[in-house]
Amino acid sequence: MSESEAAPLPELDPAQTIEVIVGFIRSQLAQAGFGRLVVGLSGGVDSATAAFLAARAVDADDLLAVLMPYRTSAPESEADAQLVVDALRCRAERVDITPMVEPMLELIGPEDDSTLRVRRGNVMARQRMIVLYDRSAAFDALVLGTSNKTEALLGYGTLYGDMAAALQPIGDLYKSQLRSVATELGVPERIVAKPPSADLWAGQTDEGELGASYEDLDRVLFALVDRRWTLDRCVAAGLDRSLVEWVARRVARTEFKRQLAPVAKISLRTPGIDHLYPRRRPGSRREG
Amino acid sequence: MRYVVALAQLAPRLGEVDANLELAAGWLRRAVGEGAQLTVLPELALTGYLLSDLVPEVAMRADDPRLAELSRLAPGMLVAVGFVEETDDHRFANSAALLRDGEVIGLHRKVYLPTYGLFDEGRFTRPGDRIRTAEVGAPLGRIGLSVCEDFWHASLPMLQAQDGATLLVNLAAGPARAPGSAAGLRAIAGWHRMQDTYALLGTVGVAFCNRVGNEEGLTFWGGSRLLGADGSVLAEGPLYEEALVVGTLETDDLRMQRYQLPLLADERLELVRRELDRVIAERAGLEPPGDEA
């Protein structure tokens, strides 16, 4: 049996998945009392897919795409983001984050110090969050998340940065599943095909940084998380033992990134522990 | 006799009882227009599903005048509706009421509360402890009500069939998983197989009304179905979309269906009970009953 048969990628029906996600976005807006969405466009397939899904849930006029380049961002990234805007004919704004982040980056240290890269990247991701939330207040909209399941499980994202959003439409889609959804939605092929990158520094690619291909990572995650296989079973199915071990450790180590911070229990009733409500309920819908 | 059943595959609003009563009223009026004699609304149709601590805020008694009023909108019609029930001694249950002309003629409290995986029902509601059927008069005779997960335990619908039900009515709020993929299709096929099997083994009709819409991250899949007592599919609703699914039972067929396939009559209830008593005793580490002598 080949590796792909023994430890397969999760299959997915793009058309039904899109129908479910569009329904989810509409219902989140309705329950919150909003009619508009803001999404940050990086030029990558995740944010392009989120934007295409949003454009099926609301009118193009009610979708604001924000392009937020930094001075070292690859020009192709912005060009690809513009492709999405042109295809959707949605509203768009360009906000250069360079002058906003430079004073903070100077505090962190020199640009050529590679040990400081992650801290610098976090500042950029969080500055983009600040811009998106400000634009959402100005545009009267909810911030649409663009995180996928692979990066959420690996904790490959910045807490309160790119992970911050009001709703996560593609948060249960593995990276390798996302491409078929993107294609079905009509996301430009150039965006679907290019190597994923956070574009936080020159030459950065996700797969280079993570040390494995998304396809391999998704096979491991699907086996460990969705099918709850043991390490030995993963290995017996042909998955690389050191990769499986690394992924399992990484999922455990980044659990905190997927949950709200714990509250020290003092009172009789504590939010998140025994004060449990759906996010949206009578009285929580914003009026007007 | 032709008996028209309407399955109101709607999307309730979470926690908004007044809005849902209005919504339900609209669907009942449509069902009246379709000539329905029985209309089934989904599980927790008056409250929404993911309630958590909203349970005491949306609960109503089974004799709540709002329920009676709702059923009076459709004179003579049987109406099955899901709601959060608060009993006299303040137990909170996920209940289905069967109403006609303002009277509660049947009540079922969900017996099996799923509390695993994505479900957390046992955290917020208490299980029912009765499995009964309701006498509704000719031509159906008796109806067996159940709520969603109850159907995943074959003993419950089979008991209701033995108790005289000619129609099993299941009110559901089933969330979709892996939509459209083989795993997702298998989950829906599981529901279908189970319904087909109950119809066949119980020689009993099945009316399954599953809600649609979204709550938090969940999407409810719909796909409501009406089956005849021979397992034939008389009506089937779409996935994910609101729909009034209408079908017609031919109640005169039941007599010959049960003559030809007398499974219910052949059931060895005494034997089943004896063996059940033995299994229960053995699992509890007790002497099997009847062995004391």
Image (cartoon, helix red, strand yellow):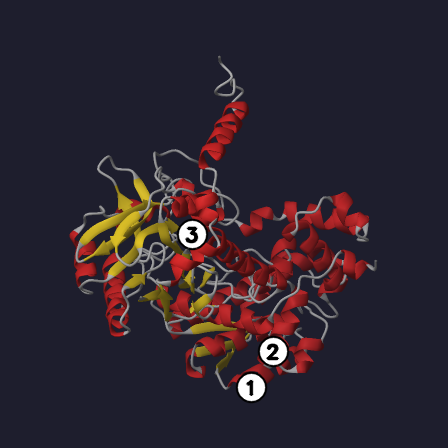
Q: Name the residue under label 1.
A: A87
Taking the spot 49% from the left edge, 74% from the top edge, the residue there is A54
Taking the spot 59% from the left edge, 47% from the top edge, the residue there is A255
Give the mark nearest the N terminus, 1 or 2. Answer: 1
Between residues A174 and A140, which one lies in front from this camera angle? A174
Q: Is residue B213 above or below residue A62?
A: above
The percent coordinates of residue B218 (x first, y second) are 46, 59
Q: Is residue B281 visible?
A: yes
SS at mark 3 in the image: helix
Residue A184's label in the rendered image is: 2
The nearer-to-camera label among 3 and 2 is 3
Residues under labels 1 and 2: Cα distance?
14 Å
Q: Mark 3 points at which residue?
A: B148
- Asked if badges 3 and 2 are on one and the same chain, I answer no
SS at mark 2 in the image: helix
The nearer-to-camera label among 1 and 2 is 2
